[in-house]
Every structure is written in C-alpha cells, then in structure tokens.
Image (tube, rainbow, N blue to C red):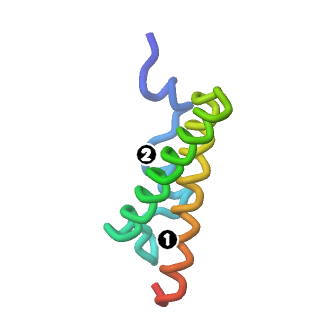
Amino acid sequence: MLTQDSWYGHRSTSSWKKALNVGKGEDRTMSTEQLRIIGIGVALGISIGVVIGAVTDNVGLWVALGVTFGAAGGVVVATVLQNRRGG
C-alpha cells in the first residue's frame, strides 16, 4: 500500500514550498482581473478552434490547440498588463 511519504518520495509540502520559494517576498497570487483576461483568451481560443476545426473537419485537434494558444495568450496579456502597471 502506498503511503503519502512513499508516493511523493518522502517530500513534504513544506519542502516543495521551499523549492519553489512560495510564500517568500512578493505576492504571487493572481488577481481577478488577470483571471478574467486568461478566461477571455481561453474562450476566444475555443471559439476560433471550433470554427477552424469545422472548416478543416478536425474539430478535436483545433479545439485543443485553441485552448492551449488561448490560455497562453491570456497569460502573456495579463503579465504584460501587470508589468506596465508596475505590479
């Protein structure tokens, strides 16, 4: 039977936080505005992916690509806006 220690290789949550420097210094949580921008990017990606997928008769591929590119584009836009505002 797997225990939590054997499953995670004897690493506790605090060691992961130390490895990622979570909780130290700057606040790394996302604001509601950033989450909205990412959501809009995903929605646009899905919409564009469905249209291209319907035209090319490969909806599954294009929806997946649309979600991927939409989320990535949303993260980029949210990051650029945060950096321009000095956040």
Q: With respect to residue 51, does 39 lie above or below? A: below
* On-image quarter of the C terminus: bottom left
Q: Is residue 26 left or right of residue 61?
A: left
Residue 46 image point, x, y percent: 50, 44
* On-image quarter of the N terminus: top left
Q: Residue at x 51, y 25 (%)?
A: 7
Q: Residue at x 54, y 70 (%)?
A: 77
Give 4 or 31, whichever is nearer the viewer.
31
Extreme-front residue of the structure: 55
Disc 2 on helix, strand or loop? helix
**For discs 1 and 2, the disc positioned in front in the rendered view:** 1
Q: CA distance from mark 1 to mark 2?
A: 28 Å
Q: With respect to residue 22, does 50 lie above or below? A: above
Q: Residues within 10 Å of mark 2 (few under 14, many from 20)?
A: few
Give 1 or 66, whichever is nearer the viewer.
66
Circle 2 sits on which residue? 13
Residue 78 image point, x, y percent: 49, 71
Q: Which mark is residue 54?
A: none
Residue 45 image point, x, y percent: 53, 50
- Residue type highlighted by circle 2: Thr
Extreme-top residue of the structure: 1
Q: Earlier in the sequence, mark 1 or mark 2?
A: 2
Q: Is residue 24 left or right of residue 76?
A: left
Q: Residue at x 49, y 58 (%)?
A: 41
Circle 1 sits on which residue? 78
Residue 9 image point, x, y percent: 56, 31
Q: Quadrant of residue 27?
A: bottom left
- Residue type highlighted by circle 1: Ala
